[in-house]
Amino acid sequence: MPVLARWIEKAGIPTVVVTMMPAVAEERLTPRVVGVEFPYGHSFGMPGDKAMQRQVLELALRVLAGAGAPGTRVDLDVEWPVPLRDAYRGWQPKEASPIVKVLLETGRRPG
Amino acid sequence: MKVDSYRFLPRSFRSYYEGRGPFTGEEELVWVPFEKRLQESRIALLSSAGLFLKQSQPSFDIERERAQPEWGDPSWRPIPAHVDNADRGVAHLHINDEDVIADPEIALPARLLEQLATDGVIGGSAAQHVSVMGYQERTLVGWRDKTAGEVIAHLRSQGVDGLILAPA
């Protein structure tokens, strides 16, 4: 996603990436980054929590319009309101993805 | 608060992401200033949660991914700002999709963006946002050779002044 953002920015459209992995987005030289410490699949927050979703979206807009230099990163100061163990299990698919199955079966490490 | 980028990632996958530096061929900084005021700007959303319209669009090709685990469908779907949530399907084998199905706004907050336009925070939202499926071949060849250009043309046709991307 950071690379896709870069291609779109290169084409003249300003971008911001809202991500659970802001350090990775920084390494990939993403123009503008909003970090959220949320489980995967939940970029804008908890289902049904409109206030949390609005907080994320408004921060993304502020960074999109207000950042002054490439590599700007702003992290959202919101903790995920679910115990870590539950949230960690909760975001993962019920069945391992095809590539994860291959990795588990072959003992290969990712990458 | 500084976000821990690996808090929810299985430990064995951390080395896949950490310390890799820029993507090959993407070592230069890129930057376009945001020139307008937000209140006069049209904003679009792009999600990689694999959203599609069940009534009118094909799903992302998860059957081919099952057969070729290192391949991910590189195509994209336009998602109307006013789509019925019940018509939004999800095709993504790498996340538990229950919460996204229950509330697609956590991945692509189209209704909330419309609300921000009504509230005067932004000038308007794109009529059609963008959906991709985030699991891709390492080279990103499909996105680079086809999808990126099509998405850029789509965003231009929508008169978009800025884009919020959200990896799932």
Image (cartoon, coloured by chain):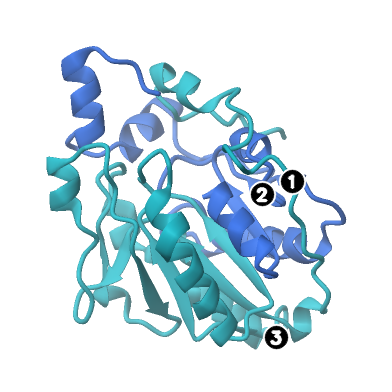
Q: Chain of mark 2?
A: A
Q: Which mark is residue A74?
A: 1
Sequence-wise, the earlier of marks 2 and 1 is 2
Q: 10 Å neighbourhood of mark 2: few (<14), some, or many (≥20)?
A: many
Q: Is residue A48 visible?
A: no
Q: Is residue A9 visible?
A: yes
Looking at the image, residue A82 sits to the left or right of residue B125; the answer is left
Coordinates of residue A102 in the picture (x, y in percent): 19, 25
Q: 10 Å neighbourhood of mark 1: few (<14), some, or many (≥20)?
A: many
Q: Secondary structure at mark 2?
A: strand
Q: Which chain is cyan?
A: B
Q: Nearer the viewer, residue A94 or A7?
A: A7
Q: Residue at x 74, y 46 (%)?
A: A74
Establish if B145 lies above or below B110: above
Tag 2–tag 1 contact (CB < 8 Å): yes
The image quadrant of residue A9 is bottom right
Q: Chain of mark 3?
A: B
Coordinates of residue B141 in the picture (x, y in percent): 40, 50
What color does chain A have in the rendering? blue
- Which residue is the site of mark 3? B123
Q: Which mark is residue B33?
A: none
Tag 3–tag 1 contact (CB < 8 Å): no
Establish if B125 lies above or below B105: below
